[in-house]
Amino acid sequence: MTARAGLDTVLQEIGANFLRMHSLVLEQLTAISKAGRDQRVGDLSASVRRTDDQIDKLELTLEDQCLHSIARHQPVASDLRFLMLVFKSLTDLERAGDYAVHVADDLVALLSGSLEARPNDLLPLLAQLVTMLERLSYAFAERDREAAASLVILDDEVDALYEQLQRSNLTRILENPRSLPGALQIARISRSLERLGDHLTNIAERLQPWLAHAPR
């Protein structure tokens, strides 16, 4: 195998592992969405944490793969851009997984208690984040610039949903002070979701300049 062929094999594996990290975060969000929709948590926290452990392990694997590729294969500029895109995005994906864990734990506490709250209010926000993550994975895998650019618009929609939820929470508290504990829990969950969306947007913003130079 030539040096170039060896590097190409490694780069393909890095790309596959990077997409695998995306799919694991998507798995977390899908499980959370289902629990919120059904209002049944089951083993949600444990399941989301197990998935997060896989995300953390993949992060370490990808860090090693990227650094070893740079040190051993002397990649050209286009390869370096790819490696740096992945390397710099690992922290964002890892943090997205962490926020998913926080959301799962808080949702379990909310649905397991007797708080007056409306978990269904979170579903539009969760659905938008699922769409963002699916679009992000597609943009990376298919080298689609338009899909990557659309992530910024989707994040604006996430922010709008977050602000709308905060306003409705405040109205609910003013109308019924007993709803305060549940409303605060909803606010905490929605804040974690909004920050998760910020991390996905960070990756999308990094992805766009790479796509401008990436081979189709």
Image: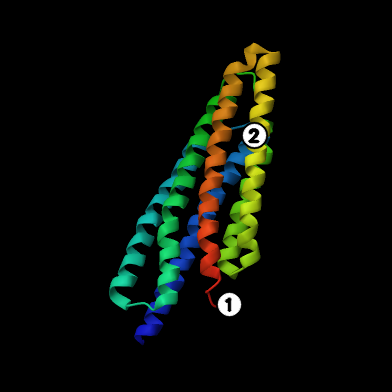
- Dot 2 falls on a residue whose secondary structure is helix
In the image, what residue type sits under mark 2? Glu
Q: Residue furthest bottom?
A: 2
Q: Which mark is residue 30?
A: none
Residue drawn at (34%, 84%) of the image? 3
Image position of 92 (left or right of 38): left
- Give the quadrant of residue 64: bottom left
Residue drawn at (47%, 38%) of the image? 46
| Picture coordinates of residue 91, whole percent (x, y) | 41, 51
- Dot 1 falls on a residue whose secondary structure is loop
In the image, residue 33 above or below residue 179 = below
Residue drawn at (58%, 28%) of the image? 187
Mark before the other along the chain sequence, 2 or 1: 2
Residue located beneath label 1 in the image: 216
Q: Which mark is residue 163?
A: 2
In the image, residue 114 above or below residue 1 = above
| Picture coordinates of residue 81, whole percent (x, y) | 44, 70
Q: Residues within 10 Å of mark 1 (few under 14, many from 20)?
A: few
Residue drawn at (43%, 72%) of the image? 11
Quarter containing the N terminus? bottom left
| Picture coordinates of residue 141, whole percent (x, y) | 56, 67
- Give the quadrant of residue 89: bottom left
